[in-house]
Image (cartoon, grey):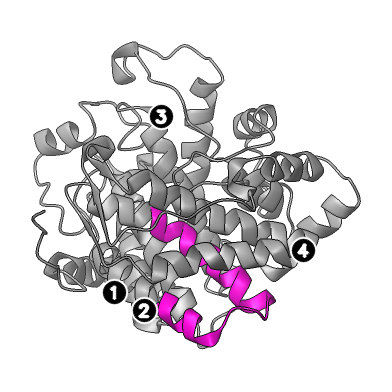
Amino acid sequence: MRRRPRRALIAVPALLAALLASLVTGPAADRAAAAPASFTHPGVTVSRGQLDFVRAKVEAGAQPWKGAFDQMMASKYASLTRTPRPRAIVECGSYSNPNYGCTDEREDAIAAYTLSLAWYITRDSRYARKSIEIMDAWSGVIKDHTHSNAPLQTGWAGSSWPRAAEIIRHTYTGWPRDRVDRFKTMLRTAYLPEVAGGSHSNGNWELSMTEAAIGIAVFLEDRAAYDRAVALFRGRVPAYIYLTSDGALPKTAPGSGLDTRGEIVRYWQGQTTFVNGLTQETCRDFTHTGYGLSAIGHIAETSRIQGQDLYPEVAERLRHALGLQAKYELGEAPPAWLCGGTLHRGLGPVTEVGLNALSHRMGYAMSNTRTLTERGRPAGSNNLFVAWETLTHAANPS
Protein backbone atom coordinates (compact mmCIF):
# COMPACT_ATOMS: atom_id res chain seq x y z
CA MET A 1 0.00 0.00 0.00
CA ARG A 2 1.14 3.52 -0.66
CA ARG A 3 2.11 5.41 2.46
CA ARG A 4 1.75 9.12 2.92
CA PRO A 5 4.94 11.07 3.57
CA ARG A 6 5.61 11.69 7.22
CA ARG A 7 4.76 15.18 8.33
CA ALA A 8 7.10 17.34 10.36
CA LEU A 9 6.42 17.36 14.09
CA ILE A 10 4.97 20.86 13.90
CA ALA A 11 3.60 22.33 10.70
CA VAL A 12 4.17 26.00 9.91
CA PRO A 13 0.46 26.80 10.47
CA ALA A 14 0.72 25.34 13.96
CA LEU A 15 3.62 27.64 14.76
CA LEU A 16 1.52 30.54 13.54
CA ALA A 17 -1.38 29.26 15.64
CA ALA A 18 0.76 29.19 18.76
CA LEU A 19 2.04 32.72 18.13
CA LEU A 20 -1.38 34.18 17.43
CA ALA A 21 -2.97 32.37 20.36
CA SER A 22 -0.46 33.94 22.72
CA LEU A 23 -1.09 37.37 21.25
CA VAL A 24 -4.85 37.01 21.59
CA THR A 25 -4.96 35.73 25.13
CA GLY A 26 -2.28 37.86 26.68
CA PRO A 27 0.60 37.37 29.09
CA ALA A 28 -1.45 36.57 32.19
CA ALA A 29 -3.21 33.70 30.46
CA ASP A 30 0.11 32.57 28.97
CA ARG A 31 1.53 32.18 32.46
CA ALA A 32 -1.55 30.22 33.56
CA ALA A 33 -1.17 27.82 30.65
CA ALA A 34 2.59 27.28 30.73
CA ALA A 35 3.81 23.72 31.03
CA PRO A 36 4.20 22.58 34.64
CA ALA A 37 7.67 22.57 36.15
CA SER A 38 7.03 18.94 37.05
CA PHE A 39 4.23 16.69 35.87
CA THR A 40 1.64 15.07 38.13
CA HIS A 41 1.02 11.33 37.71
CA PRO A 42 -1.36 9.73 37.08
CA GLY A 43 -2.51 12.87 35.38
CA VAL A 44 -4.35 12.35 32.09
CA THR A 45 -8.09 13.04 32.49
CA VAL A 46 -8.13 11.34 35.90
CA SER A 47 -5.92 11.94 38.92
CA ARG A 48 -4.98 9.73 41.84
CA GLY A 49 -7.33 11.71 44.06
CA GLN A 50 -10.20 11.16 41.64
CA LEU A 51 -9.41 7.46 41.41
CA ASP A 52 -9.31 7.13 45.20
CA PHE A 53 -12.69 8.89 45.43
CA VAL A 54 -14.18 6.46 42.90
CA ARG A 55 -12.69 3.40 44.59
CA ALA A 56 -14.15 4.40 47.95
CA LYS A 57 -17.58 4.99 46.42
CA VAL A 58 -17.59 1.64 44.63
CA GLU A 59 -16.44 -0.21 47.74
CA ALA A 60 -19.27 1.45 49.68
CA GLY A 61 -21.81 0.45 47.02
CA ALA A 62 -22.74 4.10 46.49
CA GLN A 63 -24.63 5.23 43.41
CA PRO A 64 -24.18 6.16 40.63
CA TRP A 65 -20.59 4.91 40.91
CA LYS A 66 -21.34 1.27 41.77
CA GLY A 67 -23.77 0.95 38.88
CA ALA A 68 -21.27 2.58 36.55
CA PHE A 69 -18.54 0.23 37.74
CA ASP A 70 -20.75 -2.81 37.21
CA GLN A 71 -21.55 -1.58 33.70
CA MET A 72 -17.86 -1.20 32.93
CA MET A 73 -16.93 -4.61 34.30
CA ALA A 74 -19.67 -6.26 32.24
CA SER A 75 -18.40 -4.66 29.02
CA LYS A 76 -16.22 -6.38 26.45
CA TYR A 77 -13.45 -3.93 27.28
CA ALA A 78 -12.93 -5.40 30.76
CA SER A 79 -12.53 -8.96 29.51
CA LEU A 80 -9.47 -10.83 30.73
CA THR A 81 -9.58 -13.05 27.66
CA ARG A 82 -9.30 -10.23 25.13
CA THR A 83 -6.78 -10.84 22.37
CA PRO A 84 -5.13 -7.62 21.15
CA ARG A 85 -4.97 -7.13 17.39
CA PRO A 86 -2.04 -4.81 16.65
CA ARG A 87 -1.05 -3.76 13.12
CA ALA A 88 2.10 -2.14 11.83
CA ILE A 89 0.12 0.25 9.62
CA VAL A 90 -3.36 1.35 10.63
CA GLU A 91 -5.14 2.57 7.49
CA CYS A 92 -8.37 4.53 7.98
CA GLY A 93 -10.37 6.30 5.33
CA SER A 94 -13.36 8.59 5.80
CA TYR A 95 -15.83 7.01 8.24
CA SER A 96 -13.26 4.21 8.62
CA ASN A 97 -13.60 3.07 5.02
CA PRO A 98 -11.24 1.37 4.48
CA ASN A 99 -10.93 -0.01 7.97
CA TYR A 100 -7.58 -1.75 8.32
CA GLY A 101 -7.04 -1.86 12.06
CA CYS A 102 -9.06 1.28 12.88
CA THR A 103 -11.68 -0.37 15.09
CA ASP A 104 -9.14 -2.79 16.54
CA GLU A 105 -6.80 0.01 17.56
CA ARG A 106 -9.46 2.21 19.12
CA GLU A 107 -11.08 -0.65 21.00
CA ASP A 108 -7.79 -2.09 22.24
CA ALA A 109 -6.83 1.37 23.54
CA ILE A 110 -10.17 1.72 25.33
CA ALA A 111 -9.74 -1.80 26.72
CA ALA A 112 -6.30 -0.94 28.08
CA TYR A 113 -7.82 2.09 29.83
CA THR A 114 -10.82 0.10 31.10
CA LEU A 115 -8.56 -2.58 32.52
CA SER A 116 -6.38 0.05 34.19
CA LEU A 117 -9.47 1.41 35.96
CA ALA A 118 -10.50 -2.13 36.92
CA TRP A 119 -7.04 -2.69 38.37
CA TYR A 120 -7.07 0.48 40.43
CA ILE A 121 -10.55 -0.05 41.85
CA THR A 122 -10.31 -3.81 42.56
CA ARG A 123 -6.56 -4.12 43.17
CA ASP A 124 -6.75 -7.37 41.21
CA SER A 125 -3.42 -7.51 39.40
CA ARG A 126 -4.88 -9.61 36.58
CA TYR A 127 -6.42 -6.44 35.16
CA ALA A 128 -3.14 -4.55 35.28
CA ARG A 129 -1.35 -7.41 33.56
CA LYS A 130 -3.98 -7.57 30.84
CA SER A 131 -3.76 -3.83 30.26
CA ILE A 132 0.00 -4.17 29.94
CA GLU A 133 -0.39 -7.09 27.54
CA ILE A 134 -2.49 -4.93 25.21
CA MET A 135 -0.16 -1.94 25.40
CA ASP A 136 2.91 -4.12 24.86
CA ALA A 137 1.30 -5.81 21.87
CA TRP A 138 0.74 -2.51 20.11
CA SER A 139 4.04 -0.88 21.09
CA GLY A 140 5.91 -3.82 19.58
CA VAL A 141 4.18 -3.56 16.20
CA ILE A 142 2.66 -0.23 15.16
CA LYS A 143 4.67 2.13 13.00
CA ASP A 144 2.26 4.53 11.29
CA HIS A 145 -1.28 5.67 10.48
CA THR A 146 -2.28 6.28 6.87
CA HIS A 147 -5.17 7.34 4.62
CA SER A 148 -7.50 10.34 4.92
CA ASN A 149 -8.68 9.78 8.49
CA ALA A 150 -5.20 9.15 9.87
CA PRO A 151 -5.05 12.34 11.99
CA LEU A 152 -8.46 11.72 13.57
CA GLN A 153 -7.84 8.01 14.13
CA THR A 154 -4.50 8.83 15.74
CA GLY A 155 -6.23 11.40 17.94
CA TRP A 156 -8.90 8.98 19.10
CA ALA A 157 -6.59 6.08 19.92
CA GLY A 158 -3.88 8.44 21.13
CA SER A 159 -6.30 9.90 23.69
CA SER A 160 -6.98 6.53 25.33
CA TRP A 161 -3.45 5.07 25.38
CA PRO A 162 -1.88 7.63 27.76
CA ARG A 163 -4.83 7.43 30.15
CA ALA A 164 -4.20 3.72 30.52
CA ALA A 165 -0.44 4.06 30.62
CA GLU A 166 -0.53 6.78 33.28
CA ILE A 167 -2.56 4.66 35.68
CA ILE A 168 -0.54 1.49 35.14
CA ARG A 169 2.89 3.14 35.09
CA HIS A 170 2.31 5.11 38.27
CA THR A 171 0.19 2.77 40.41
CA TYR A 172 1.44 -0.72 39.47
CA THR A 173 4.97 -2.05 39.76
CA GLY A 174 4.83 -4.89 37.25
CA TRP A 175 5.35 -3.09 33.94
CA PRO A 176 8.98 -3.73 32.92
CA ARG A 177 11.00 -0.59 32.28
CA ASP A 178 12.06 -1.65 28.80
CA ARG A 179 8.41 -2.11 27.82
CA VAL A 180 7.51 1.28 29.30
CA ASP A 181 10.28 2.81 27.22
CA ARG A 182 9.03 1.00 24.12
CA PHE A 183 5.54 2.34 24.75
CA LYS A 184 6.95 5.85 25.07
CA THR A 185 8.73 5.39 21.75
CA MET A 186 5.46 4.28 20.17
CA LEU A 187 3.66 7.41 21.36
CA ARG A 188 6.49 9.68 20.29
CA THR A 189 6.96 8.22 16.81
CA ALA A 190 3.61 6.73 15.71
CA TYR A 191 1.20 9.17 17.39
CA LEU A 192 2.61 12.55 18.39
CA PRO A 193 3.84 13.60 14.92
CA GLU A 194 0.38 12.99 13.47
CA VAL A 195 -1.50 15.07 16.05
CA ALA A 196 0.92 17.78 17.18
CA GLY A 197 0.50 20.03 14.14
CA GLY A 198 -3.25 20.47 14.37
CA SER A 199 -5.83 20.27 11.59
CA HIS A 200 -7.88 22.65 9.47
CA SER A 201 -10.75 20.18 9.18
CA ASN A 202 -13.90 20.35 11.33
CA GLY A 203 -13.15 21.41 14.87
CA ASN A 204 -13.71 18.01 16.48
CA TRP A 205 -10.66 16.77 14.54
CA GLU A 206 -8.24 19.28 15.97
CA LEU A 207 -9.72 19.05 19.46
CA SER A 208 -9.44 15.24 19.53
CA MET A 209 -5.93 15.45 18.13
CA THR A 210 -5.02 18.05 20.78
CA GLU A 211 -6.42 15.82 23.50
CA ALA A 212 -4.10 13.06 22.35
CA ALA A 213 -1.16 15.46 22.14
CA ILE A 214 -1.54 16.80 25.67
CA GLY A 215 -2.03 13.32 27.15
CA ILE A 216 1.03 12.01 25.35
CA ALA A 217 3.01 15.06 26.49
CA VAL A 218 2.14 14.33 30.12
CA PHE A 219 3.13 10.66 29.89
CA LEU A 220 6.38 11.57 28.11
CA GLU A 221 6.95 14.54 30.45
CA ASP A 222 7.56 16.61 27.33
CA ARG A 223 7.10 20.27 28.21
CA ALA A 224 7.50 21.51 24.64
CA ALA A 225 4.80 19.13 23.37
CA TYR A 226 2.55 20.18 26.25
CA ASP A 227 2.93 23.86 25.39
CA ARG A 228 2.21 23.20 21.71
CA ALA A 229 -0.98 21.37 22.64
CA VAL A 230 -2.13 24.18 24.91
CA ALA A 231 -1.50 26.74 22.15
CA LEU A 232 -3.63 24.73 19.72
CA PHE A 233 -6.37 24.38 22.34
CA ARG A 234 -6.46 28.07 23.08
CA GLY A 235 -6.68 28.93 19.41
CA ARG A 236 -9.33 26.33 18.55
CA VAL A 237 -11.87 26.53 21.41
CA PRO A 238 -12.93 30.16 20.68
CA ALA A 239 -13.27 29.13 17.01
CA TYR A 240 -15.43 26.12 17.91
CA ILE A 241 -17.92 27.60 20.39
CA TYR A 242 -19.53 30.98 19.75
CA LEU A 243 -20.28 33.66 22.34
CA THR A 244 -22.14 36.86 21.51
CA SER A 245 -19.15 38.78 22.85
CA ASP A 246 -17.21 37.51 19.82
CA GLY A 247 -19.12 39.93 17.59
CA ALA A 248 -21.28 39.39 14.54
CA LEU A 249 -19.33 36.37 13.35
CA PRO A 250 -17.59 33.48 15.08
CA LYS A 251 -13.86 33.65 15.66
CA THR A 252 -11.63 31.72 13.31
CA ALA A 253 -8.81 29.41 14.29
CA PRO A 254 -5.30 30.78 13.70
CA GLY A 255 -4.09 29.74 10.28
CA SER A 256 -7.55 28.60 9.13
CA GLY A 257 -7.57 30.84 6.05
CA LEU A 258 -11.21 31.81 6.63
CA ASP A 259 -11.43 35.49 5.75
CA THR A 260 -14.91 36.34 4.46
CA ARG A 261 -18.39 36.06 5.93
CA GLY A 262 -19.30 33.54 3.23
CA GLU A 263 -16.35 31.31 4.07
CA ILE A 264 -17.14 31.42 7.78
CA VAL A 265 -20.85 30.68 7.24
CA ARG A 266 -20.01 27.70 5.03
CA TYR A 267 -17.59 26.42 7.65
CA TRP A 268 -20.36 26.74 10.24
CA GLN A 269 -22.58 24.44 8.18
CA GLY A 270 -24.52 27.32 6.58
CA GLN A 271 -25.74 28.78 9.88
CA THR A 272 -26.18 32.57 9.74
CA THR A 273 -27.65 33.30 13.19
CA PHE A 274 -25.19 32.91 16.03
CA VAL A 275 -26.10 32.53 19.70
CA ASN A 276 -24.27 31.65 22.89
CA GLY A 277 -23.20 28.00 22.86
CA LEU A 278 -23.64 27.34 19.14
CA THR A 279 -20.76 25.23 17.89
CA GLN A 280 -19.14 25.00 14.51
CA GLU A 281 -20.71 21.55 14.10
CA THR A 282 -24.13 21.99 15.77
CA CYS A 283 -25.83 22.14 12.38
CA ARG A 284 -23.82 19.20 11.11
CA ASP A 285 -24.93 16.83 13.86
CA PHE A 286 -24.77 16.54 17.62
CA THR A 287 -22.61 13.42 17.50
CA HIS A 288 -19.59 15.19 16.04
CA THR A 289 -20.33 18.19 18.24
CA GLY A 290 -20.16 15.83 21.21
CA TYR A 291 -16.71 14.69 20.13
CA GLY A 292 -15.50 18.27 20.18
CA LEU A 293 -17.09 19.17 23.52
CA SER A 294 -15.80 15.98 25.11
CA ALA A 295 -12.25 16.68 23.97
CA ILE A 296 -12.44 20.22 25.36
CA GLY A 297 -13.43 18.85 28.76
CA HIS A 298 -10.72 16.18 28.70
CA ILE A 299 -8.00 18.67 27.81
CA ALA A 300 -9.10 21.14 30.47
CA GLU A 301 -9.32 18.31 33.03
CA THR A 302 -5.78 17.19 32.26
CA SER A 303 -4.46 20.75 32.51
CA ARG A 304 -6.21 21.21 35.87
CA ILE A 305 -4.61 18.04 37.23
CA GLN A 306 -1.25 19.36 36.05
CA GLY A 307 -1.78 22.60 37.98
CA GLN A 308 -2.24 24.76 34.86
CA ASP A 309 -6.02 25.14 34.95
CA LEU A 310 -7.55 26.01 31.56
CA TYR A 311 -11.16 25.77 32.73
CA PRO A 312 -11.46 29.49 33.60
CA GLU A 313 -10.54 30.35 30.01
CA VAL A 314 -13.20 28.12 28.45
CA ALA A 315 -15.89 27.94 31.14
CA GLU A 316 -18.33 30.40 29.54
CA ARG A 317 -18.07 28.78 26.14
CA LEU A 318 -18.24 25.22 27.39
CA ARG A 319 -21.17 25.74 29.77
CA HIS A 320 -23.22 27.51 27.10
CA ALA A 321 -22.36 24.85 24.51
CA LEU A 322 -23.26 21.97 26.78
CA GLY A 323 -26.47 23.75 27.80
CA LEU A 324 -27.58 24.55 24.26
CA GLN A 325 -26.94 21.08 22.93
CA ALA A 326 -28.52 19.50 26.03
CA LYS A 327 -31.71 21.54 25.65
CA TYR A 328 -32.35 20.20 22.18
CA GLU A 329 -31.03 16.72 22.96
CA LEU A 330 -33.73 16.58 25.64
CA GLY A 331 -36.31 17.05 22.91
CA GLU A 332 -37.12 20.74 22.58
CA ALA A 333 -38.09 21.62 19.02
CA PRO A 334 -35.55 23.87 17.31
CA PRO A 335 -36.62 27.28 15.96
CA ALA A 336 -36.57 27.80 12.21
CA TRP A 337 -33.45 29.99 12.38
CA LEU A 338 -31.42 27.18 13.96
CA CYS A 339 -30.07 24.76 11.35
CA GLY A 340 -33.13 25.38 9.21
CA GLY A 341 -35.32 23.95 11.96
CA THR A 342 -33.79 20.46 11.66
CA LEU A 343 -31.32 18.97 14.11
CA HIS A 344 -29.52 15.64 13.98
CA ARG A 345 -29.40 14.62 17.62
CA GLY A 346 -27.22 12.00 19.30
CA LEU A 347 -24.83 13.86 21.59
CA GLY A 348 -23.44 10.73 23.21
CA PRO A 349 -22.06 10.06 26.73
CA VAL A 350 -19.95 13.22 26.76
CA THR A 351 -21.32 15.58 29.43
CA GLU A 352 -20.06 14.16 32.76
CA VAL A 353 -16.60 15.75 32.75
CA GLY A 354 -17.85 19.22 31.85
CA LEU A 355 -20.78 19.07 34.23
CA ASN A 356 -18.58 18.02 37.13
CA ALA A 357 -15.99 20.70 36.48
CA LEU A 358 -18.31 23.59 35.72
CA SER A 359 -21.27 22.83 37.98
CA HIS A 360 -20.00 20.70 40.86
CA ARG A 361 -16.63 22.45 41.26
CA MET A 362 -17.20 25.93 39.80
CA GLY A 363 -20.83 26.44 40.79
CA TYR A 364 -22.67 27.01 37.48
CA ALA A 365 -26.30 25.83 37.57
CA MET A 366 -26.41 24.09 34.15
CA SER A 367 -29.90 22.65 34.63
CA ASN A 368 -30.34 21.26 31.10
CA THR A 369 -26.92 19.62 31.15
CA ARG A 370 -27.58 18.14 34.57
CA THR A 371 -30.96 16.74 33.52
CA LEU A 372 -29.50 15.17 30.37
CA THR A 373 -26.50 13.77 32.24
CA GLU A 374 -28.51 12.22 35.05
CA ARG A 375 -30.99 10.78 32.55
CA GLY A 376 -28.15 9.05 30.70
CA ARG A 377 -26.38 7.53 33.69
CA PRO A 378 -24.38 5.45 33.84
CA ALA A 379 -22.54 6.87 30.84
CA GLY A 380 -20.74 4.15 28.92
CA SER A 381 -18.37 4.39 25.96
CA ASN A 382 -18.76 5.87 22.50
CA ASN A 383 -16.32 3.18 21.31
CA LEU A 384 -13.97 5.87 20.00
CA PHE A 385 -12.27 7.71 22.87
CA VAL A 386 -14.90 8.31 25.59
CA ALA A 387 -15.38 5.72 28.34
CA TRP A 388 -16.94 5.34 31.81
CA GLU A 389 -17.21 8.99 32.80
CA THR A 390 -20.06 8.56 35.27
CA LEU A 391 -17.67 6.27 37.13
CA THR A 392 -14.68 8.61 36.97
CA HIS A 393 -16.23 12.08 37.12
CA ALA A 394 -19.75 12.09 38.54
CA ALA A 395 -19.73 14.58 41.45
CA ASN A 396 -16.00 13.97 41.86
CA PRO A 397 -14.55 16.79 43.99
CA SER A 398 -10.87 15.91 43.50
Q: CA distance from mark 4 to mark 2?
A: 28 Å
Chief secondary structure of the magenta portion: helix
Disc nearest the viewer among 1 and 4: 4
Disc 4, SS? loop
Q: Nearer the viewer, residue 294 or 2?
A: 2
Q: CA distance from mark 3 to mark 2?
A: 36 Å
Q: Is residue 284 left or right of residue 11?
A: right
- Horizontal and vertical percent for residue 354? 57, 47
Say which residue appears at 28% left-offset and 39% top-offset: 96
First in residue order: circle 1 vs circle 4: 4
- Horizontal and vertical percent for residue 52? 78, 64
Disc 2, SS? helix
Task: Find residue 185 and name its label.
Answer: 2
Task: Find residue 124 and name its label.
Answer: 4
Q: Which quarter of the image is occupied by the C terminus?
A: bottom right
Q: CA distance from mark 2 to mark 1?
A: 6 Å
- Horizontal and vertical percent for residue 55? 80, 58
Query: Is mark 2 in CB contact (under 8 Å) with mark 1?
Result: yes
The amino acid pointed to by label 1 is Thr
The residue indicated by pointer 3 is 286
Disc 3, SS? helix
Numbered range of the magenta stretch: 157-184
